[in-house]
Amino acid sequence: MRVRLFREAAPPWLDGDERLDEHVVKIKATAACLQQAAAEWDRHLASFPPR
């Protein structure tokens, strides 16, 4: 899996005119690990009201 971080994820001290290089994070994980992580994410988000 490749995760790309965009300007919305940039640190707040970056000036709006400053060039933001693309950041790519490569993650090696099995399908089972990803399914478990997604289920845990859903459980954590359940305490927040829907928007």
Image (cartoon, grey):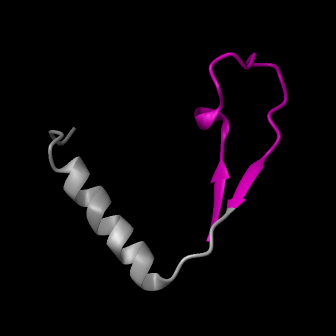
Q: Is residue 29 left or right of residue 32?
A: right
As rendered, which of 23 and 40 lies closer to the eye? 40
> Does the magenta stretch mainly form a helix, a strand or a loop?
loop
Whether the magenta-drawn stretch holds residue 42 is answered as: no
| Residue shown at 75% from the left, 16% from the top | 15
| Spot occupied by residue 7 in the image (x, y as percentages of width and height) | 66, 35
Q: Is residue 7 above or below residue 5?
A: above
| Spot occupied by residue 11 in the image (x, y as percentages of width and height) | 65, 26
| Spot occupied by residue 35 in the image (x, y as percentages of width and height) | 36, 76
| Residue shown at 37% from the left, 66% from the top | 37
Whether the magenta-drawn stretch holds residue 7 is answered as: yes
| Residue shown at 28% from the left, 62% from the top | 40
Q: Quadrant of residue 32?
A: bottom left
- Magenta highlight range: 1-25
Point out the image quarter for the N terminus: bottom right
As rendered, which of 37 and 22 lies closer to the eye? 37
Q: Is residue 34 left or right of residue 16?
A: left
Q: Please tell me how many numbered marks the rendered image carries.
A: 0
| Spot occupied by residue 23 in the image (x, y as percentages of width and height) | 75, 48
Q: Quadrant of residue 24?
A: bottom right
| Residue shown at 18% from the left, 40% from the top | 48
As rendered, which of 39 and 51 lies closer to the eye? 39
Q: Is residue 45 above or below residue 41?
A: above
Which residue is the extreme one toward the bottom? 31
Point out the image quarter for the C terminus: top left
